[in-house]
Amino acid sequence: MRSPCLKSLSITLIVALSTFAPRQGLAASPEPVKAEHGMVVTAQHLASDIGVEVLKKGGNAIDAAVAVGYALAVVYPTAGNIGGGGFMTIRFKDGKTTFLDFRERAPLAATKTMYLDDKGDLVEGLSTEGYLAVGVPGPVMGFEFTRSRYGTKPLKELIDPAIELAREGFVLQQGDIESFDGKTERLARDPAAAAIFLKPDGKPFAAGDRLVQTDLAASLSSIAEKGTDAFYKGAIADAIVKASADKGGILAKEDFERYQVRELEPVKCNYRGYDIVSSPPPSSGGLIICEILNILEGYPLSYLGYGSAETVHAMIEAMRHAYVDRNTALGDPAFVENPAAKLVDKSYAKEIRAKIDPFKAGVSQELMPAGFTESKETTHYSIIDDEGNAVAVTYTLNGSFGAGIVAPGTGILLNNEMDDFTAKPGTPNLYGLVQGEANAIEPGKTPLSSMSPTIISRDGKPFMVIGSPGGARIITITLEAIINVIDHGMNIQEAVDAPRVHHQWLPDKVFMEPYALSPDTRKLLSAMGHDVQVDENWMIWGQAAGILVGGENVAEIEAGGGARYSGAVDSRIGAGAARGY
Ligand code: GLY
């Protein structure tokens, strides 16, 4: 018999436990940030502040997205940029949607074999380092195209905060410093990059140091004054072309003069009643997220549970099949015919499900199409305004600090996006992606991307804004945040924090983040034939940034009692912040 004392202790415990009623998902995550009028979630807190200020002053989500895009180019130089490229998905307050492609284009002098030697072998580093790796940048044209069409504020007002941060500098915090880690040697190779991103003695910056970018301030000021011509027709293009010519690159003035933004129809699909809007080719992101979701719709993930062997097996097999399509069939729509309708067709997903053995891992080699031979630095931000306009932007320099080069006098870091092309069919790129002919290099072509800025609605109302960096893993990171919310009931913070798994067809391995799977689950998966490998490189696992509308999780939204906007930046990010008002 229990003593009265023990009995009262157990009653106290039960009361205490029910006071802190367990929520589904990861109770260890901090609470999402709540707000009623607008939310901005980015990888750097100063950029989030700037975005919220724009909203407070009556700008819409598109204005805020432009201001944040320029601000991140200053305060998040590892990935924020005007020397790279990106995508923007917009859902307007009336439910209409659009997609802006301002990704890099291959220079006109680019050739299919430009990264191969005489024997046809890939020359290591050619597609990732130096000027030969640089695609023609798009953000300045992309931001201006979108602002003039859908924004409400003048360019100068949106770019001024970024100019000030570049001119006056900002104090680096520990989170900022993390993205400089391990980059000293690479930045030191380019004197113009070293002069800005290393200390005068060549040492890396430390927390508390001030990063001042005078040349970048001048470049931004000239864009504020002269618009896109400053970048594409004026002194900035001239400086980049000259540096490229001096250092063995192929960028020409004509590449800049011909640069155009594409406004495209986004990819759309429906998952368990939720309407998904995401990136079309030249991104693979939207199509592959939809393909995987369509496959997973046939499995009761919510019942099987987060992290169970059955759920993870279904996810891996869906990823395996979808990444075959990604890597072999997709490319720039101006150059190749993408099987877009097929990939988002529910009957195609059903065919794939029929091939998935519920008890056994598939074999990637067996999915090899006939004739096919065998960072990570991007950043995503999510914004929603008081009227309900939602914007998801993912933009990138590709590698961390891009190609690690700055054209002298511009302060602008340049991308190494050319590495996203198939440099040699069957040979892995920076992200280990083994790709095919559809993504071969051609002049003026855009390399295939995985960037997946995604907006989800339900019953005609915005529900979720989400995306992430992570190279080839962008797709699965974004996907997992979506199913964590929809299937596993997590709140938005838990959904972006939860440890992840990834499969990309080749290599035929399941990558897991530390602690993503219990030892028991790993044993079950190994017994099915999966080769599970822990990947401890936290930087490759992305940094998702999400917003939920109407509550912090589905249960709260359905009960109708939540804050209007709940924002969450991935806890993996040191410097990011969700800010609302
Ligand atoms: N550079 C990464 C991507 O666009 O997928």
Image (cartoon, rainbow, N blue to C red):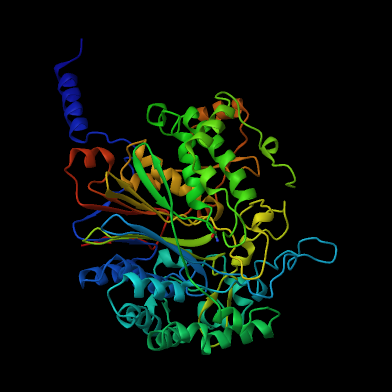
Q: Is residue 45 above or below residue 473?
A: below
Q: How many marks?
A: 0
Residue 398 lies, in percent from the top left, at: 55, 64
Q: Is residue 391 above or below residue 75?
A: above
> Ligand 1 is found in which quarter of the picture?
bottom right
User: Position of 523 compared to 69: left or right?
Assistant: right
| Residue at (47% x, 85% y) in the render | 229
| Residue at (68% x, 78% y) in the render | 249
Residue 175: quadrant of the picture: bottom left
496 or 230: nearer the viewer:
230
Residue 319 lies, in percent from the top left, at: 54, 40
User: Position of 175 compared to 438: left or right?
Assistant: left
325 or 534: nearer the viewer:
325
Question: Can I make out residue 254 in this image?
Answer: yes
Quadrant, the N terminus: top left
Residue 573 lies, in percent from the top left, at: 41, 58
Residue 579: quadrant of the picture: bottom left
| Residue at (63% x, 35% y) in the render | 531
Question: Can I make out residue 201 in this image?
Answer: no
Farthest residue, direction right: 119
Residue 396 lies, in percent from the top left, at: 50, 65
Quadrant, the C terminus: bottom left
